[in-house]
Amino acid sequence: MNHSTRPNNEFLMFVRALRDELMSMSDEDVLASSDLEQLRARRARMLQDAKKEAGRRRLAAAKARLQSSKAGTAAVERIDPTEARQYIARAANDERYTLVARQLGEGLSDEEAVRLYRQMRSLEQGQSEDES
Amino acid sequence: MSAVLTNPPRLDRLQVENAMAAMSDADWRRVEFIASSLSHGFTGFEPEDLILEAQTKLLEGVRVWPTGVPAVVVLENVMSSIASNARKRIKEGPIDVTVEVDPLETDYQGGVSAGQTVFSRTDATPESQAATREQIAAIDRLVADDADLQDLVAAWAMELKGEEAWMSLGWTKDKYEANRKKLTRRLDKLAFEGSKK
């Protein structure tokens, strides 16, 4: 069933009543004493202005989203070498990596530790995808 | 192949643009009258600013145009929401998004499927209510020289419309329609023409 919630003040009720009354008035009455040429020019100008402004705002929002997305990606890619080493050390007890991890031992540079960490994570992801 | 087609709940950007471009002269004029009254007695927006901002938000996709709802209803809905937020901004500083009208809701009761007609406006802070009281008072002053128009403003402020309004006022339909026309002209004259300076 249709029902409407009344606006909570007289002014908004007035505006709503005005709107409904205008919609029930004939086009002829609504346009009485209007300069149609001016009206059409005004309408065309405003629609053009609105399109330009909407385009500008959409572009600004897209740029902001892109920036935000880049920041998020960068955060994911930053890997702490210490955490990477701890991960590799834990993997030494994992039968999938025991041989590799023991062979590499503790003497990894930061870059090597991060690279190995990435490889291990990638292998894990590949394995879990195969299992699923 | 599915034979069931349903209308999407909202117009896409191109459809919004086309719907605006396709508005009749009379509907555009109706929107101007509404913008005039929303702006009257309020320094936050000129009528043209209000229409422009509403169009922009619809084209931007920030506000939606529900499928099947007429242009006048959609634009009134968005303009009322913008004016409501502007009143709050002026009175309180930063806007409170909770006063936004839900863009998918509308009180429009004609030609749209049932269940799509609940429309809530929660413009309920003491400051914003004071601002709207000032606006209705400004409209009342606008018609202070005409007792019939004052009565009509009072009826509309109680959301009495059409037959219910003229019966309540004890008027004939003709008298009601003549005064309705007079009131809309007066609203337009003072507010909308002021925006064209």
Image (cartoon, rainbow, N blue to C red):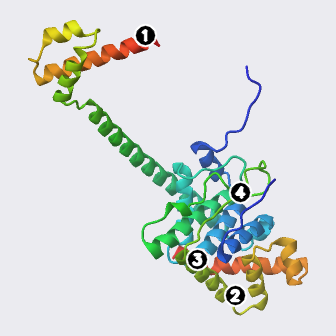
Task: Give the chain letter at badge 2.
Answer: B
Q: Regarding mark 3 in the picture, which secondary structure is present there?
A: helix
Q: Position of residue B70 (x, y in %)?
A: 71, 54
Asked if residue B114 is positioned above or below residue A8 in the image, the reply reads: above
Q: Count neighbours of disc 2 (C-alpha within 10 A) and say few if under 14, some if 14 to 19, many if 20 or more.
A: some
Which residue does the image show at 77% across and 91% down from the upper left? B147
Q: Mark 3 belongs to which subunit?
A: B
- Frontmost residue, A21 versus B192: A21
Q: Name the residue under label 3.
A: B129
Q: State which tag comes first along the sequence, 4 or 3.
A: 4
Let me know if marks 2 and 1 both belong to one chain.
no
Q: In this view, does B56 lie above or below A125?
A: below
Q: Mark 1 points at which residue?
A: A130
**At label 1, which amino acid type do we have?**
Asp
**Image mark for residue B143:** 2
Regarding residue B185, the answer to whether it shows in the image is yes
**Image x and y of residue A45, in percent:** 54, 59
Seen at 44% across and 51% down, the residue is: A57
- Is B146 in front, or is B85? B85
Q: What element carries label 2?
A: loop
Q: Residue at x 83, y 76 (%)?
A: B165
Secondary element type, mark 1: helix
* Distance of label 2 from label 1 (alpha carbons): 78 Å
Residue A2 at x, y = what percent?
79, 55
Mark identifier at residue B118? 4
* Label 2, label 3: how far apart the Cα atoms are: 22 Å
Q: Distance between the residues labelled 4 and 3?
A: 21 Å
Distance of label 4 from label 1 (alpha carbons): 50 Å
Name the residue furthest top.
A99
